[in-house]
Image (spheres, rainbow, N blue to C red):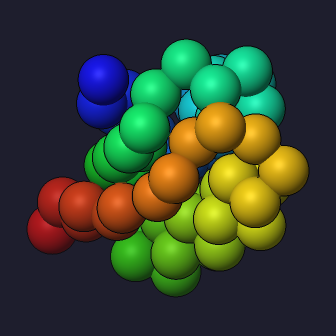
Amino acid sequence: MKIGGIGAGAVGSVCLLSSVLRGIARETVVVNRNLKRAKAVVTDLQYDAALSLSRSATEITRT
């Protein structure tokens, strides 16, 4: 299953982090206007994915 988060703010990143730690999805997609913020959230998710069942974190940015 793939989970996508629209917005990499406080609520969006915590929701994605929770889904990664619970192992709900095998792939996580982050959608955000700010590329730097999206990359930071993806990096955090990748570190956390090593501790869970989730395998990858992917970023998609909107310009």
Q: Is residue 46 left or right of residue 33?
A: right
* Residue 31 x/y as whole percent: 32, 49
Q: Whole-percent x and y of residue 62?
A: 18, 60
Relative vertical location of residue 47 with respect to residue 26 in this rendering, above or below: below
Q: Is residue 8 visible?
A: yes
- Farthest front residue in view: 53
Image position of 61 with respect to 8: above or below: below
Q: Is residue 14 visible?
A: no
Residue 10, horizontal then vertical, whole percent: 74, 37
In the rendered image, which quarter contains the N terminus? top left
Foreground of the two, 54 or 7: 54
Q: Position of residue 21 (x, y in %)?
A: 77, 32
Question: Which residue appears at 52% of the width and 75% of the height?
Answer: 39
In-front residue for pair 24/41: 24
> Looking at the image, which residue is at 69% across and 53% down?
49
Q: Residue furthest right?
A: 51
Residue 12 falls in image quadrant: top right
Q: Residue at x 65, y 73 (%)?
A: 43
In the image, residue 28 sits, relative to residue 50, either above or below, namely above
Total numbered circles: 0
